[in-house]
Image (cartoon, coloured by chain):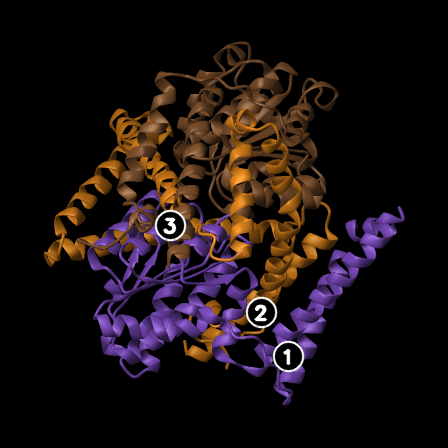
Chain colours: A brown, B purple, C orange
Amino acid sequence: MSDQNIFDKLQNIDRRVFYWVLFITLMVPFIYPIGLPVKVVQNTRDLYEGITGDNINPGDIAIMNFGYGVSAWSECAPGFTVCAKALFREGARIVFMGSQYDVELSMNKLMNDAREDFANKVYGVDYVFLGYFTGGESAIAQLATDAWTVYPSDHYVTPDAQIPLMQDFHGWQDVTVVLSSDTGDVGSYFLRQWQGSHGTRLAEIGIAMNGSTDYPYYLAGNYFGLSIGSRGGAELEVLIREPGEATTAMDSINASHLLIVLAVILANVGYLLSRRKA
Amino acid sequence: MTFILLILTFAVMYYYMYLGKHGKVFKIRTLPAIQAIPEAVGRSAEMGQPVMWTPGIAGSLNDSTQGPQTLAAISILEYVAEEAVKAGVKIAAICPLPDALPLVEETMRTAYMSQGKPEEFNIDSIRFLSGQSAYMTGTLGYLQRERPASTILVGGFYYEAVIIAEGGNTIGAMQIGGTNNIHQMPFLVATCDYMLLAEELYAAGAAISANPDMLGSIKGEDMIKWLIVVLICVGFLLGAARITFLADLLRV
Amino acid sequence: MSNILKREAVFAVTGLVTVLMFVEYFFFPQDWIVASTIRNWAVIIYNISLGLGGVRLIQQHVMGTQRRKENWQFSALFLVAFVVMLLTGLAGYLGTGVATSNGIYNWLFVNVYTPLGSTAYAITGFYIFSAAYRAFRARNLDAALMLVAGCFVILSNAPVGEVIWSGIPAIGEWFRFVGQVPGMRAFEVVGALGMIAYGFRALLGKERGFYAGGAEE
């Protein structure tokens, strides 16, 4: 039996205890929702305003990139859905593409979550789903110069020549705005190969982990808007006035964030008091 | 303007590399993480456990910002492999990148050959785990089963960094990390004993070889940093005075 | 081919491609057929490497199963899964051009692969939690300041911060959107410079990783 005092024990709580506490903390808000209001920050507001109103005209082509897989649905999908809805309501035409091999699942989810908006749209005319691409930054660079060589057909193997929307999309010069939602670096590929080279308007719907990395680009004007993590998705849902998954998840985020701060405080109380005692 | 700055950067680096090659001695500060590699290998030798090296899944060679991290990680792998062969320690290279796999194999083979022990090289020491989730869980499984005494986590990482590093922490391994991905740096700093931050990862190759012309390139890089600092200061003062010609020029 | 010739060939190809891509990036606002062809080839080579990875995986696990190495049962399971996904995906692809049109492939992808991937991502939260609990100690003044700033940032990201104290979002957002930005920019700049220097050394044949141990000394 160790001779640890209470302060040492506070610093050395078994991590499995924390895993259980965190798990329960995350589950409880789903049963007893709290529903605190979400304040919208400027970068999210700029993103939303950048794809609505005077910034988008009917018929403009927007690229929306699924740079996230199913594992990041909770962080990226809500914001992505709001942006797709907003663009459709402005009359924009959308080219959907993806760098993850489960992109079809993400597209199906989007079509389900925004079914009312998709119901009014014609595939091939108002939107097209090009599917998965490989080749990383080289492919994105090539997409800017000659899109048909990267995607000779859409995801359903219909040749580009038979898709009305693709007749108007050959490269960067045909695209008004690019929205990339990713867990990795695809947004930065668009940043270098589209925004940096050709000045195409670009925004990012990213995970919270990438927020601090993306923010300097937003401040510098490379991104006209930025949505960070689930919180960004919830803010976009506030702006479009349609609460969804991100708003529901905010309760769990509240609980988990509070718990992590409490755990860190607990550990430091134990640490400081044990040092004082020593 | 960007092109001019790039050419200037190359010219300055080449100049210092030339000076280095012709006798001028440049010293760079010690990188504790690189100095810790022999210690990590020694720890593994004492404990009779292997060393694990892994470069992260972000660094596809097709990517202009992530690929160099993988290549820098492979430079470090050669050093680690040479030290491991000298000490008689097994090394496990877990590589999730199919395009880097031939480089990893060739690097390890060369390291064994350079130490005069080509017969000890075993291709099974290089494991390929494709896909982020498979890589992450596979590496965790390896850590739990084989319990390496030291782990070298250098390269381009995504969210698997915190999981792999924390997994290494759980088994009490000595961990050396390094990445240029800012979003993963805090996690590796919190979980690793030694860390290569940002440019230190790229300078590692030069630090290991102590080649005079490679050290010269780092000196040249430092000179360009000074230039950038001067530009920032001048730009700040001009910006405060609402004179934007420098900002406009650099946007060209 | 001798090692020296291999190295010289790598130098030559790397140097030529670099110069061509530089020229295209800086001097050609429109598409240049040469650079476009090189990019297409880069995509093709990357896709070939995916096949290489697949072959490597099969080799690894076939050997493991044949030699009855430790945990060979998992290698056998992997090979079964590989073959099933490959055949069903091919069947779907050959039938309609879309792999997921095959029912078995789609079911396995949606009901097995997807939940496993989501679970793996969810583990991140737990591990970050335990890493934060273990590592965030106020050992000195710098660490204490960082800890306080971190707490403000965490609480500003959640609406509950505003409920606790109305000043938390303002302070936390200052840290996130003003305080840490110079540091991030500094990292970006030095990281980019390091990358340029590394690329330059690699072009000159000095870097080992680039030439798989065959660099010029």
Residue at screen point 56% across, 63% down:
B199
* Residue A40 on image: x %, y %: 62, 25
Is residue B34 in view? yes
Chain letter for mark 2, please: C
Give the label, 3 or 1, closer to the camera: 3
Q: Quadrant of the C terminus of chain A?
A: bottom left
Instruction: Report the front residue among C86 and B201.
Output: B201
Q: Earlier in the sequence, mark 3 or mark 2?
A: 3
Q: Which residue is mark 1?
A: B17
Q: Residue at the spot x=44%, y=23% of the render? A: A251
Q: Nearer the viewer, residue B152 or A91?
A: B152
Identify the disc placed on residue C203.
Answer: 2
Q: Residue furthest front?
A: A277
Q: How far separated are the C-alphas under marks 3 and 1?
A: 44 Å
Instruction: Check disc 3 and report its element: helix, strand or loop.
Output: helix
Q: CA distance from mark 1 to mark 2?
A: 13 Å
What amino acid does circle 2 point to? Leu
Nearer-the-camera pick, C93 or C117: C117
Give the percent coordinates (x, y) of residue C135: 41, 52
Label 3: few (<14), some (14–19) or many (≥20) C-alpha neighbours in 10 Å: some
Q: Where does label 3 land, which residue?
A: C134
Real-space Cα separation, disc 3 to disc 2, in angstroms: 43 Å
Drawn side of residue B166 relative to residue A228, left or right: left
Q: Is residue B114 above or below residue C203?
A: below
Q: Residues within 10 Å of mark 2 (few under 14, many from 20)?
A: some
Q: Regarding mark 1 in the picture, which secondary structure is present there? A: helix
